[in-house]
Amino acid sequence: MLNALSAVPGRAFNLVGRMFDTICDVPGIKVGHYTDREAVTGCTVVLCEAGAVAGVEVRGSAPGTRETDLLNPLNLVPHAHAVVFSGGSAFGLDAAGGVVRYLEEHGYGYWARVARVPIVPAAILFDLGIGSPAVRPGPEAGHQACLAAASGEVAEGSVGAGTGATVGKILGMGRATKGGVGTSSLKIGADIIVGALAVVNAFGNVVDPETGQTLAGPRRSDGPGFLSTAEIMKSGVPWQSPLPQNTTLAVVATNARLDKAQATKVAQMAHDGMARAIVPCHTMVDGDICFALSLGDKPGDVSTVGVAAAEAVSMAVVRAVLRAEGLGGIPAAREVT
């Protein structure tokens, strides 16, 4: 099983002429993490400092968000300057304040005649059931993530907003598996790049989207391996109904030229990548959300960009659990043998 898992991450996303296979392959994107391993929480910032046309789609029924209404194509502000993902449940939305401060310090934001106002959408996940529930990322954590942000390689696994992420919680936290942060990218033709970053804190299982093999989920009690969340739900056997404490957060970026309506469509299509790699997905106890960012001027077909975005998201989800490490008493998938 471990050999099969280790073969997954690079199998479909070899970039000719690119160095990293991360969302930072899209010019203008930087990623930074703030990680608190003692409290088992953190936040992740995706910076697009000069501004990106942005869209968003919420499919889960237990979301926690900030500034998403501004991304509606009917609304005024054309650009976002960062996207923030944070642990800490609703408390973690405070991390966005530190990102706003960083952007203002560096002269970025929407010009509102008397000041530049950074536009920073954010979304949170529930990680209060692991580590210390009294410690949540705040403005200083968001500011520190910005200071750490860079292009190129991106740390994956149990870092940033994925530090306290877990998956497969239908039988309770005692049988869950570690989630985390993953990223990937691919090319369309010669010059269009689509990248994704996902933070996986899902209620359901993570599966290989090509084979259906379970990669992480509720751990078996009678030996190594995982049970199927969907099969448990359909069996009629009583299971522990969880609070809305699950979420997969994703952001896709591209150098293709998109307007706000097209970016919203790409965000919608990118959710297909979640559904291919997470089973079940978009439940009443998940807060699944996907943002889309357009930073370039390359002409491209919006449907094709959406197809690539879904593929990049599914691989980012897979990499998130395969590159996680056990924390807070929750083992990683690679430790369940």
Image (tube, rainbow, N blue to C red):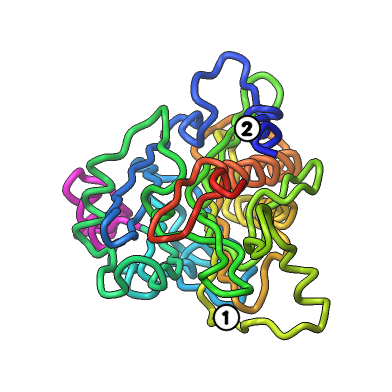
Q: Is residue 105 magenta?
A: yes
The quarter holding residue 312 reads: top right
Q: Is residue 251 visible?
A: no
The picture quadrant where one finds residue 150 is: top left
The type of residue carrying mark 1 is Pro
Which stretch appears magenta? 97-119
Pick out the residue farthest to the left: 105
Residue 26 in the image, given as x and y percentages of width and height:
50, 32
Report the side of 40 relative to 3 (left or right): left
Mark 2: secondary structure: helix
Category of crowding for the residue at label 1, using alpha-carbon neighbours closer than 10 angstroms: few (below 14), some (14–19), many (at least 20) = some
Which residue is found at the position 50% from the left and 66% from the top?
75
List x then y, in percent, for residue 237: 77, 83
Q: Which residue is mark 2?
A: 6
Q: Is residue 264 visible?
A: yes
| Whole-percent x, y for residue 105 in the image | 16, 48
Q: Residue at x 59, y 38 (%)?
A: 257
Which residue corresponds to the image point at 36% horizontal and 50% vertical from the top-left? Answer: 160
The reply to whether the magenta stretch includes residue 82 is no
Amino acid under label 2? Ser
Q: Which mark is residue 242?
A: 1
Is 257 in front, or is 241? 241
Marks 2 and 1: CB-CB under 8 Å?
no
Depth order, front residue of 130/153: 130
Dot 2 or dot 1, earlier in sequence: 2
Residue 60 sits above or below residue 313 on the image: below
Crowd class of label 2 (few under 14; some 14 to 19; many from 20; radius 10 Å): some
Q: Is residue 259 above or below residue 167?
A: above
Which image quadrant: the N terminus? top right
For image coordinates 44% across by 70% down, the residue present is 126
